[in-house]
Image (spheres, grey):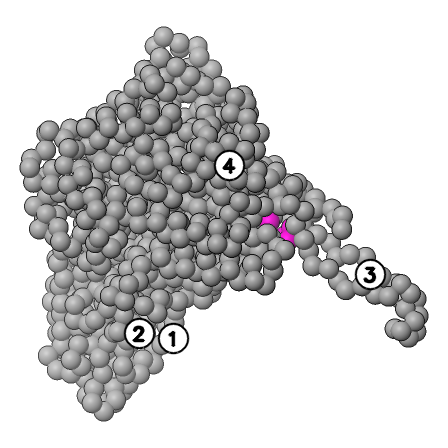
Amino acid sequence: MNVSRERLPIPDPQRPTATAGDVRDQDPPFAPRQPLRAPAGAPNVVVVLLDDMGFGAPSAFGGPCRMPTADRLADGGLRYNRFHVTAICSPTRQALLTGRNHHSVGMGVTTEMASAAPGYCGIRPRSAATIGQLLQGNGYSTAAFGKWHQTPARDVSAAGPFDRWPTGEGFDKFYGFLCAEMNHWYPVLFDGTTPVEPDRRPEDGYHLSEDLVDQAIDWVRDQRSLKPDNPFFTYLPFGATHAPYHVPSEYREKYRGAFDHGWDRQREITLQRQKELGVVPPDAELAPWAEGVPHWDELSAEEQRAAASLMELYAGFAEHTDDQVGRFVDALEELGELDNTLFVYILGDNGASAEGGLGGTLNEHRFASGIPDSAEFINSHDAALGDATTHAHYPVGWALAMNTPYQWTKQVASHFGGIRDGMIVHWPAGIAERGGRRDQFHHVIDVVPTILEAAGLPHPVEVDGVPQQPIEGTSMLYSFNDAEAPDRHRVQYFEMVGNRGIYRDGWMAVTRHGTPWVMVQDGGRRSFDDDVWELYDTRSDWTQSHDLAAEHPRKLRELQDLFLAEAARYGVLPLDDRMTERENPREAGRLDLMGDRRSVSFHAGAKRLTEETAPNVKNRSHAVTARVRIPEGGAEGVLVAQGGRFGGWSFYLHEGRPSYAYNHFGSEVTTIRAPEPLAPGEHTVRMAFDYDGGGVGRGGSVALVVDDEQVADGRVEATIPYYFAFDETFDIGVDRASPVTDDYPVVDNRFSGGLVELRVDLGDDGHSDVAAQRRFAAAHE
């Protein structure tokens, strides 16, 4: 049946005319309504996206992380060695699914850092439908499993709205999480829009990556059984290899001692392997080392052991993730679907991450607040690496090595270390060559037009009544069967938190504005006008090693002007380099769910809330009041908790006694407890936190009150200033995922009494680091 696919949804067919009063006399007889079909021959589509993996990490691109599935798909398909992303997660994902530049679709930074500016608002415009919507509207079955991180932060609650959740953006099925990262042992997940937790635990063999692939395999099998004529689209964006590095110990043990030679030597080994594979040219050089990052021989023996062990852990995490992809590939092959599946395997949504700092960390939240871990501390926990008690991230030196042969890391959109990742395309039915290499310049926005062309689908001019803005990517299909085809994607801008780059026909002008491992700024501000621009001819200088700015000032000016033109065209301006400030909705200029409310009441069955949708108790006085019913025999468990093992707070009953625990980044837990258990009957219990003030992260005095009588008091000497956790939630009546305190068990800590109501009251003394930064700047002008 020929149908117009220029407008979605495809209109219903014209209603046939009745020609008789008796259905038996109808001529011609009515035919059954046919389901919507994709074009004949349209392939299945699978897009797999890994998180925080650099170009030089996977074995398929010469790296030390053994990834046999990536190797297998590359050997049976094509390696793309000039494929680019956006330098950070949410923007890459929004660009990947829409085919537009990330500022064009409102995702200049992550959802948690959104502002009021159109290019940074974190809200996908309806004029930019996702590939899920386009394929779903053309007869594909669609599903997504894993990390989403595109829903506006204020919408991630039981109140919705749900139109920008995966099931509102073109996916029939979603199973995964919506935030930046996730605990792989104790995840908090959604099935569609319903909060769920796994029914197994680590001791039962549970791991999130394995769960995601189990779900994906089960879904594909259902599609083949029930709708064998429908092509399917599976989007599988893993939480791995983003911190925390959680992996079964046997995978870490595979790499024991493998990195004792250090990151300098690893770069040399990787570059040689890359040249042997042909993913870099024979004359490619190692890009310059980042200033301020120690070389391996400058570390002490303790520092070397800590750094090597964290890299062992990361490599095991990467291999384990690829093994899960392998299970999915095997399932497609068993179903007879692999050959006619356009399989796109993107080995990183940005460059390798430097967010573990110069020495690495066992708790990235701790480091993000300016508190480093010593090598001795890391080594003392060697046996625990990768288990549920750690939230590890490797050091900057390994991030640089995992981006071999390029400069810099994640966040740095100016240099290839932040924006170039390996990409593999496997489609035996559509690609003749096996084990080919493609050198054409491409970008993540090119995936959508590639899928559409492969499926024989137009880009619709209208979706759900909304005219569509143009696709900004370039289909890669021209290169599938022509290795020598000239580049078609000839111009591309890059920008992330002030780091900028502009590419045209091999020339690239770049300027780095910030240092990604400086997580907490010192209060000073660097003007964009002070940024130094560099110029590279990447046709002869593959790794941006030789700055030609002084030799070709006119070419540099030409490209700087082009950047401004592209920035104006795609919504990059005004530039915004704020980091910590933008985590505060009020300072960022975005709406949050709580708004100006200073008192919020919850019922006992209230669903978990993310940090963006929960009452913000940080850096201010606050109180929590619970009305409870205590049964005969007493009660135990959590009334309310936020965060978990790596930072947070909890108000709960322990041995029947009202208790408050404040967990300062997993390094110190302060507990204040009433002397007596609550007697059976109704009670009002209250925790009042009187914040010291004078800045962020300060301490405060705590009072516990039962039925208007103070029963205990104490002090918390320091608090968490910015974020408790991306992968933990604010929970009523239970502490989900990891526990804030060892006073109660993991998961099995639900309040056993009756929780009638819980109220959170916020003081008017909130402090912001922005004010401190401004005072600092004024004092130093």
Gap between marks 2 and 1, in whole Å?
Answer: 8 Å
Alpha-carbon neighbours of circle 1 within 10 Å: few (<14), some, or many (≥20)? few
Q: Please name which of the two marks, 1 or 3, marks the residue nearer to the observer.
A: 3
Q: Which residue is mark 1?
A: 605
Residue 620 image point, x, y percent: 25, 58
Residue 511 appears in the picture as rendered: no
Q: Which residue is mark 4?
A: 445
| Dot 4 and dot 3 residues touching (CB under 8 Å) | no
Alpha-carbon neighbours of circle 2 within 10 Å: few (<14), some, or many (≥20)? many
Q: From the viewer's perspective, is 539 left or right of 622?
A: right
Gap between marks 4 and 3, in whole Å?
Answer: 39 Å
Mark 4: which secondary structure? helix
Q: At label 4, which amino acid type do we have?
A: Ile
Q: From the viewer's perspective, is 35 left or right of 715?
A: right
Residue 321 image point, x, y percent: 34, 49
**Is the residue 340 above or below the residue 267 in the image?**
below
Location of residue 650 (image quadrant)? bottom left
Q: At label 1, which amino acid type do we have?
A: Gly
Residue at 48% across, 25% down: 440
Gap between marks 3 and 2, in whole Å?
Answer: 54 Å
Gap between marks 1 and 3, in whole Å?
Answer: 48 Å
Q: From the viewer's perspective, is 239 left or right of 382?
A: right
Q: Which residues are magenta?
A: 135-139
Give the overall secondary structure of the magenta segment: loop
- Between disc 4 and disc 3, whose residue precedes? 3
Q: Which residue is mark 3?
A: 15
Residue at 35% across, 57% down: 210
